[in-house]
Every structure is written in structure tokens, then in C-alpha cells.
Amino acid sequence: MVNVAVIGTGYVGLVTGVVLSEIGHTVTCIDINKDKVSTLKKGQSPIYEPGLDELMVKNIEAGRLYFTTNHQEAFVNAHIVFIAVGTPQSDSGAADLKYIRQAAKDVALNIVNDTVIVVKSTVPIGTNDLVESIIRENLVADVAVNVVSNPEFLREGHAIHDTFHGDRIVIGAESFEAGNTIEQLYKPLDLPVVRTNRRSAEMIKYASNAFLATKISFINEIANLCEPLGANVLAVAEGMGLDHRIGRAFLNPGLGYGGSCFPKDTEAIAYLGREYNAPLTIVESAIKANSHQRYIFLQKVLDYFNDNVEGKTIGMLGLAFKPNTDDLREAPSLYLIDELEKRGAIVKAYDPVVKHLKQCVETVDDVLNGVNAILLVTEWEEFDKYDFTEHVVFWGRNFN
């Protein structure tokens, strides 16, 4: 088994570190936030992800999982270092690489062993080359360094399951030996491995997310057409999905995609297309369709109230962008709350995990009482048991 360091304890970094410790490696996760590290050392995850806390506690107690703010402490025994920091979207749509650059410098200034650096963050094509050049320019110790691209394909809310039962592990390396090192690291997972070069690995991540986002936007536009034609979009999706060339996954009509990946990654790859004069018109259209979907839903609510919701109380069930997560990034709920409140509506909302917004109430019943309409925004399983027949309901998601 191997000593591993992980820079970043966000969603990707924390899940990666915990899973690697679960399959037997000794892992030290690094974060500059002292309070966050203190919480992590207690086995408490700062993000909601089913099963994560239990695995954290198990591996901390087993002496395989550690947390620190000190890079030197983390790197002293490490021969593999993962970079799993954020790549937020800039105003232009491009990925902001400031945290990647800083992580590369931290590696260069602190490693003391021959090291394979693994870029786990979702990054534009060519970023692994940049990371390697930054490390080599700033390297202090006389050690060998190889950089490997290893993008993640985790679904929020299912990350633990996806790690152990994933479709593939993608390893992009210019060094055959470095690629072998990372393949051996993951061997206990017994998953299919795709070996390629770094730029192809980077593109696999972006292309995958862009395609899935396009699939979501496509079925939403089909749903919009089905409604005036009297067709059932669920039956349409089922019939389409049985075609193995298409598949049923991501053909779920609703309010569109949100979260930390699809919005940011589609914008980033669309930006690259424009920058290199190879415009991705299909992806650009998917982005526009996704943005328009939540407007269409809002308009249905406004039409019901004759475009006047002032003083109306609107109940909202679900805030997170999808079930089994507390992630509000690009969540349709935030757009809807903002637009309704700007028009004078009173919004009260319930989500099983998200509790900190001022609109939040304690229970589903608190939402149902005294409202003029209910918006079903996130398909949490617990909402299935409620009878909404006495309420005006706008179905933003499909429930069982």
C-alpha cells in the first residue's frame, strides 16, 4: 500500500482521500482552513454525502486517514500527491486556475521524494502541462516528478457508490511508469481502466459532462413540446431509453441541471471552442436551453396567478439541485425564490438537508399549511408519501 497526500478537502478531494484510505492506503488530506481541518479530524464531513462520515471515522480510527494544514507534514512520506482544488468559473466562462497554480507551487516547494502528481480537479485541456511546468520551475528538492491526469466522474449524493462501482478509471500520462503507478493505486477497486495521454484524459472529462448536460437539455425541450401535443414525456423517455444507442440515464425531464459540475464544465468547454475557433454549437444550445427551462417553469406559476403573485405564499419542496446532497450551486430553487420574491411573493421552503436559508421551515407540513401553491423542485424520496391533491402543485421534477 502507498502513502498518499491530497491537496484540497472539497467534494472531490475529501471523497478521493477517504476512498483511497478505505482500500488500504495511508492518506493525508491538506486544507488551509484550520477550523475545517479541526472538524475533519473529528470525523465530521463539511459536506453532505451519504456514507462519507462513517468511512471517515472508520479510517481515522484505523490510522489510515489524516488531516492537516501543513504541506511539509503531508508530503514527508508521500510518493503520490493528488491536486483536488476548485476551478471556479471566471466571468468569461473559462475555468479560473488560481488554486491549481498555487497547489502546484506548494508541491514544488515541499515535496522531498520522487513523486507522481495527480491532477484530480476538472481542468481545461493543457492544464496538466501547466502544472508540470510550474512544479519544475519552482522545485526545491532534487527529486523526480511526473504529472498524471485522473479526472473524477462522481455523482453528488452517490459518490461513495460511484467510486467503488464506477464505469471506468481514466489515467492520462506521458510517462508509462507513472501511469502504471496510478493504475496500481486503484487496483483494489477492480474497475476498467482507460489509459491515454494527459490532454485526452482532460478532454474525456469535459466531453462526458457536456454530452450528459446536452442529454438533459434535449429531454427538457422534448417535454416542452409534449405538453401542448398531449404526449407523455415519461413514456417518450422510456421508449427512447430502451434503445441501447441512447440509454435511459439522464432522460429525466425537469428544471434542468445544476450543481458544481455541469454548469461550470459546459461553460468552460464552450469557452475553449470559441477560443480555438471550433465553436461547440450543440453545447452552446444546451446551455441556453437549460437556462431557459427554469424560466419556463416560473412562467407557468406566474400565468396561474395572472402574473401577480404579490402577497401570495408559495411553498417550495426541495432546495438542493438534486436529492442526497446539500449543494445549492446553480440550483433552480435559488432562481425561483429570487424571481418570486422580487414580485412580492412570500416563499417558505423545506429541504431535508439544506436548512440555512431564511425561507426554510422545519417540516413538510409547515410548507403545506396556508400556501397558495406548491412548487416541487427537488425529488427527495420522502416527498413521495405526501398527498398533494388538495393543493395547487407545480411539478418541477418527476416523482414516483
Image (cartoon, rainbow, N blue to C red):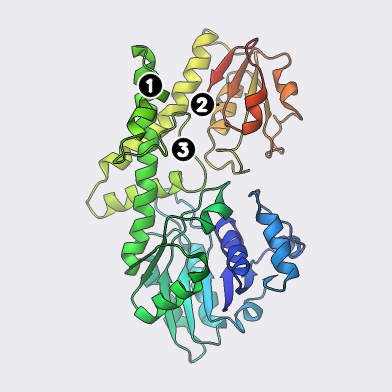
Q: Nearer the viewer, residue 30 or 364?
A: 364
Percent from the top left, x then y, of residue 91?
A: 44, 48
> What amino acid does circle 1 point to?
Asn
Q: CA distance from mark 3 to mark 1?
A: 16 Å
The label number, if any, that marks residue 224 in the structure image? 1
Secondary structure at numbered mark 1? helix
SS at badge 2: loop
Q: Residues within 10 Å of mark 1 (few under 14, many from 20)?
A: some
Q: CB atoms at circles 2 and 3 under 8 Å apart?
A: no
* Mark sitting earlier along the chain (2/3): 3
Q: Is residue 95 above or below residue 228?
A: below
Q: Which residue is mark 3?
A: 257
Q: Position of residue 393 (x, y in %)?
A: 58, 16
User: Gap in Å between the C-alphas at discs 1 and 2?
Assistant: 14 Å
Q: Residue at x 73, y 57 (%)?
A: 44
194 on left or right of 61: left
* Residue ranking furthest to the top: 306
Q: At label 2, which amino acid type do we have? A: Asn
Left or right of 313 on screen, residue 164? left
Q: Residue at x 38, y 34 (%)?
A: 217
Give the mark, 1 or 2, whose residue is nearer the N terminus: 1
**Residue on which the image places disc 2:** 398
Q: Are marks 3 and 1 in contact (CB under 8 Å)?
A: no
Q: Is residue 285 visible?
A: yes
- Residue 358 is marked as none
Q: Residue 30 appears in which quarter of the rendering? A: bottom right
- Mark 3 vs mark 1: which is more N-terminal? 1
Neighbour tally class for label 2: few under 14, some 14-19, many 20 plus, Cα within 10 Å: some
Q: In the structure shown, which secondary structural element does the residue marked by tag 3 occupy?
A: loop
Q: Is residue 266 left or right of residue 188?
A: left
